[in-house]
Image: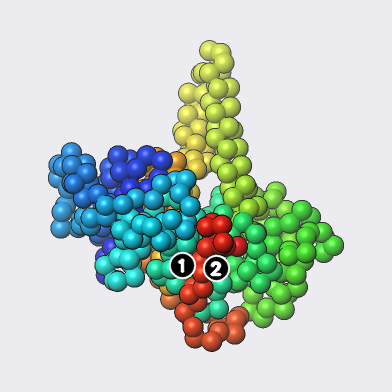
Amino acid sequence: MSAPVIAIDAMGGDFGPHCIVPASLSCLAENPSLHLVLVGQSSLLEQLVAKHPGVDRARLKIVDAPEMVTMDERPAQALRGKPRSSMRVALEQVRDGGAQACVSAGNTGALMALARQVLKTLPGIDRPAMVTALPTRGAPCLLLDLGANVDCPAEQLYQFAVMGAVAAESLGRHQPRVALLNVGTEEIKGNQQVKLAAALLQQAAGLNYRGFIEGDGLYRGEADVVVCDGFVGNILLKSSEGLAGMLVAKVEALFRRSIAARIVGAVALPLLRRLRAELNPAQYNGASFLGLQGIVVKSHGSAGADGFKAAIRRAAQDVEHDLPAQLRDRLGQFFRVDGSSGGTDDVTARDGWPSN
């Protein structure tokens, strides 16, 4: 397979290019087959790259984009008012074949709207969904949606389940177990959208649908793919990250409380380091947009260097598995598609925020 080429929106996120450029260059040095395209204000990017001697410029390209999308900007403004934003130009690199994937830590709503406009959705898919892997007692579980669609009808939840199952299969899961996140496992539980989605999934031949799952069941490893709307998924994701950080901090504080505790902590240090690494949210950073005709990975806006590197690795993994092609090949099994590319409708609501 050819070396992965990934376009980086270098101006996005809370920390911008001063974090993203060093993280990208570190990732480039660690992966000899990786090629990167840094997109942003070229003079600033050149200055930042110059601070890192030994960069393999044969595998690094800088593309100028004088505008940037701010974290609080309305998607409509990003769509119509900034044709040369780093986010749009990075997506255009994927569309035009200059890169195989795009990574951005920028405004989620703007990235969603621009990705739909520039790359379009796959046939049969109304809206893309954000997916990431969460640690469980067993193998990691794919959770979607994570915030791209805060309110979803049953048909979209059904589409998310299909896309999540295909993504899990690409990671080596045989007949991945699919479940709907709900307030209980009984059939009478849940809102109308979840109940209607369950009815659709029960009729889906070729999908290993296991019914409803509660939040604790996710972490017990009872499913390989868990589906919910973006409002619920984003809260679950952020709560999980906060809980993991709190647990690690409490364990470390416990081993510092006394001399005896410090001695025990020194003996347990290798295990503590392993626990910290396994629970570190940074290593799970990077949510893939499923359902686009191209690969887009969203990094946390607040991600540091390690987190952004994880998002780049996620994009390289998606390139390796060619997720859009796998989805395109499988969608006809579950949907009636008309061959249209999708995503040609208005991607913003009347108030300028992404429609849901």
In terms of sequence position, does the residue under pointer 2 or pointer 1 come before the other? 1
Q: Position of residue 79 (x, y in %)?
A: 42, 61
Res 243 → quadrant: top right
Res 139 → quadrant: bottom right
- Residue, x 15% and y 58% (percent of image)? 58
Crowding near the residue tagged with mark 1, few <14, some 14–19, many ≥20 C-alpha atoms within 10 Å? many
Q: Secondary structure at mark 2?
A: loop
Residue with the mark numbered 2: 127
Relative to 208, does residue 129 appear above or below in the rendering? above
Q: Is residue 104 visible?
A: yes
- Residue, x 73% and y 56% (percent of image)? 182
Relative to 163, does residue 132 appear above or below in the rendering? above
Residue with the mark numbered 1: 116
Whether residues under marks 2 and 1 lie with C-beta atoms below 8 angstroms apart, the answer is: yes
Q: Could you tell me the amino acid type at mark 2?
A: Arg
Compared across the picture, whether 62 is left or right of 174 comes to left
Q: Position of residue 173 (x, y in %)?
A: 54, 67
